[in-house]
Amino acid sequence: QVQLVESGGGLVQAGGSLRLSCEVSGSTVRFNTMGWFRRTPKQSRELVATINSAGTKYADSVKGRFTISRDNAKNAVYLQMDSLKPEDTAVYLCNVERTNWAGVAEDYWGQGTQVTVSS
């Protein structure tokens, strides 16, 4: 069964950095698109960044500060977060998606990792 495990969250001061990791286990399936969402204290869910063979996409609020990358051999996706702001405080959720042999999209979610940025 596909499972996503995130790590790397924590408490950091504004201007600091964190690196989030998401590793897929329980399956040899590889995914087309991998990315990160976040659930803010106001409970909104926002797309942060995605990566696939076509390139990367970022939310406007994190452009220039966050970098998404992946390691296909490890079936993992990472989010390097620099110049963190208090507004970045959220639970960060890993998401992966693939199109199966029948052309049907499948996606999976991690449990999330907490990122807290203090002023």
Image (tube, rainbow, N blue to C red):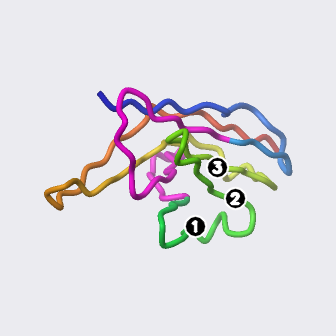
Question: Residue 16 in the image: x percent, y percent?
Answer: 84, 46
Q: Which residue is mark 2?
A: 66
Q: Earlier in the sequence, mark 1 or mark 3?
A: 1
Q: Which residue is mark 3?
A: 79
CA neighbours of label 2 inside 10 A, class few (<14), some (14 to 19), many (20+): many
**Mark 1 vs 3: CB contact within 8 A:** no
Residue depicted at x 80% and y 37%: 12
The stretch in magenta equals 20-48
Q: Is residue 45 left or right of residue 71?
A: left
Kind of element beneath mark 3: strand
Q: How many marks?
A: 3
Residue depicted at x 45% and y 35%: 24
Residue depicted at x 42% and y 47%: 95
CA neighbours of label 3 inside 10 A, class few (<14), some (14 to 19), many (20+): many
Question: Residue 25 in the image: x percent, y percent?
Answer: 43, 29
Q: Is residue 42 above or below residue 3?
A: below
Decide whether residue 86 is among the magenta residues. no
Kind of element beneath mark 1: strand
Q: Earlier in the sequence, mark 3 or mark 2?
A: 2
The label shown at residue 58 is: 1
- Looking at the rendered structure, the kind of residue marked 2 is Phe
The quarter holding residue 110 reads: top left
Q: Is residue 51 left or right of residue 65?
A: left
- Looking at the rendered structure, the kind of residue marked 1 is Tyr
Question: Residue 23 in the image: x percent, y percent?
Answer: 52, 35
